[in-house]
């Protein structure tokens, strides 16, 4: 079993205080012409800026300016009703948040007691571990791969006696490893949570950015008392809006709202009103926006994967993801050191998150990977970035 405990082997949380490659990537000065493939940033060209401006004008023209007043802790109409209909749940289970991470923080504080064990993706999105510091939780790494969380590995840990209070996973287009949990495995995960009495934190910011025929269903998550389902408008309408939501199990709704009322009281009434106006005034606008984004990001993912193969034949193993904003190529040439490659790439003028930035436990080779973010970088610069990576390989 790979449970970690305070006072013995450091947990993933403590390992994250200085992940390999974090310090020099954030402190060094990149080249002035550097191409940054660092973050999951949406392309401004697919964000509905003009429509947001029009929705804002309509909201600010309403008598009494209700959007500039206080509002309910859980959120306001019509945005909560629109989200509830899209998620297929009663509106009282929707709580509006200040983005996805805020939803995770609320879930952590409501569900966990200090020192609880939490199963986490391996490798894991580092920001979640920062949130876990609120509860001083211990972590149990569970491998993720092309089909998402390894439920066989999770079940082995449970059968061996592990008793997590919660489990954290990114089920759609995993960050960083780009895998997606299939529908049958979602049902299986929820069944395990119900049988062993833990709560799944399903973190789903990339869910709408699928490239193929459609997304995997989320009914298993939304219809269980053992899942807190977290989402956000960050990747679809813009990070600066700072607006998201959680689908809360009925048994936790009162606790979440009470906790929120003791913190910031509620999300911006104004931003809620503008987004509510945006998505309800034209019922097709949100999906039209997503259609443009999906086509753009798919093209960029394909361009980057192809350019890598051309620039450094046989060096990288890359698979075009089924959605999301990241490529997760593996350095297949064992002669190449991942840290040396990152340094050489920076000298050539391309910056990325090395795999070692993402905390990982036994059984993974995350440190042999690169996470390349392509959402906000046009295809010409993606090809140039791949060329520069090829030049960095040649340096080594």
Image (cartoon, grey):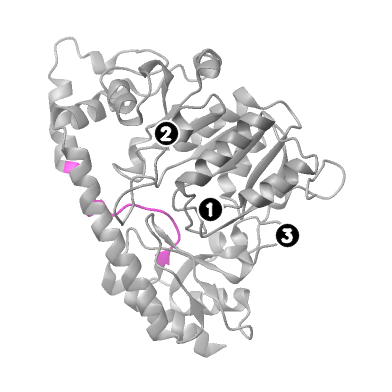
Q: Find residue 130 and report its image quarter.
A: top right
Secondary structure found at label 2: helix
Q: Dot 2 corresponds to which residue? A: 219
Q: Residues within 10 Å of mark 2 (few under 14, many from 20)?
A: some
Q: CA distance from mark 3 to mark 2?
A: 32 Å
Which residues make up the magenta segment?
Answer: 36-49
Please tell me which residue is depicted at 63% across the width and 43% down the height of the picture: 129
Q: Which mark is residue 148?
A: 1
- Who is closer to the viewer here, 170 or 113? 170
**Viewer-side label of 3, 1:** 1
Between circles 3 and 2, the one closer to the viewer is 2
Q: Residue 61: give x, y in percent of width and height.
A: 12, 19
20 sits to left or right of 233? right
Q: Quadrant of the C terminus?
A: bottom right
Disc with the residue nearer the chain's start (2 vs 1): 1
Image quadrant assignment for residue 320: bottom left
Q: Which residue is mark 3?
A: 362
x and y percentages locating residue 239 in the rendered image = 36, 42
Q: CA–CA distance between discs 3 and 1?
A: 17 Å
Local secondary structure at mark 3: loop
Q: Is residue 204 left or right of residue 137?
A: left
Mark 2–mark 1 contact, CB under 8 Å?
Answer: no
35 or 294, which is in the foreground?
294
SS for dot 1? strand
Q: Earlier in the sequence, mark 3 or mark 1?
A: 1
- Name the residue: 60% across, 59% down: 357
Residue at the limit of the structure toward the right, as seen here: 8
Locate residue 206, reporting x and y percent. 40, 47
Can residue 48 be seen here?
Answer: no
Q: Residue at horizontal 53%, vertical 46%?
A: 185
* Residue at mark 2 to residue at mark 1: CA–CA distance: 17 Å
Q: Is residue 241 left or right of residue 343?
A: left
């Amino acid at each position: 079993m790979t449970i970690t405990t305070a006072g013995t082997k450091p947990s993933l949380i403590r390992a994250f205080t200085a992940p390999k490659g974090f310090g020099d990537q954030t402190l060094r000065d990149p080249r002035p012409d550097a191409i940054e493939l660092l973050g999951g940033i949406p392309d401004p060209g697919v964000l509905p800026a003009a429509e947001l401006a029009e929705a804002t004008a309509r909201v600010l023209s309403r008598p009494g300016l209700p959007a500039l007043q206080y509002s309910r802790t859980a959120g306001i109409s019509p945005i909560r009703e629109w989200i509830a209909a899209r998620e297929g749940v009663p509106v009282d289970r929707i709580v509006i948040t200040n983005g996805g991470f805020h939803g995770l923080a609320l879930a952590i504080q409501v569900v966990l007691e200090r020192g609880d064990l939490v199963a986490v993706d391996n490798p894991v999105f580092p920001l979640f571990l920062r949130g876990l510091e609120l509860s001083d939780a211990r972590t149990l790494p569970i491998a993720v791969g092309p089909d998402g969380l390894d439920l066989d590995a999770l079940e082995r840990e449970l059968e061996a006696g592990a008793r997590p209070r919660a489990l954290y996973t990114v089920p759609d287009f995993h960050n960083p490893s780009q895998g997606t949990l299939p529908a049958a495995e979602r049902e299986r995960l929820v069944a395990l949570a119900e049988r062993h009495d833990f709560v799944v934190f399903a973190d789903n910011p990339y869910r709408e950015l699928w490239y193929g025929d459609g997304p995997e269903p989320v009914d298993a998550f939304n219809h269980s008392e053992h899942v807190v389902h977290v989402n956000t408008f960050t990747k679809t309408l813009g990070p600066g809006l700072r607006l998201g939501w959680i689908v809360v199990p009925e048994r936790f709704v009162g606790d979440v709202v009470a906790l929120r009322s003791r913190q910031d009281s509620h999300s911006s009434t104004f931003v809620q009103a503008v987004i509510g106006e945006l998505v309800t005034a034209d019922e097709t606008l949100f999906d039209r926006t997503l259609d443009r984004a999906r086509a753009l990001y798919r093209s960029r993912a394909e361009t980057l994967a192809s350019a890598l193969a051309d620039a450094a034949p046989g060096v990288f193993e890359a698979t075009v993801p089924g959605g999301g904003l990241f490529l997760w190529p593996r350095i297949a040439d064992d002669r190449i050191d991942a840290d040396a490659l990152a340094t050489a790439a920076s000298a050539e003028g391309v910056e990325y998150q090395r795999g070692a930035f993402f905390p990982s436990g036994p059984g993974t080779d995350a440190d042999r990977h690169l996470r390349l973010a392509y959402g906000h970088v046009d295809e010409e610069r993606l090809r140039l970035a791949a060329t520069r990576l090829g030049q960095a390989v040649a340096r080594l």
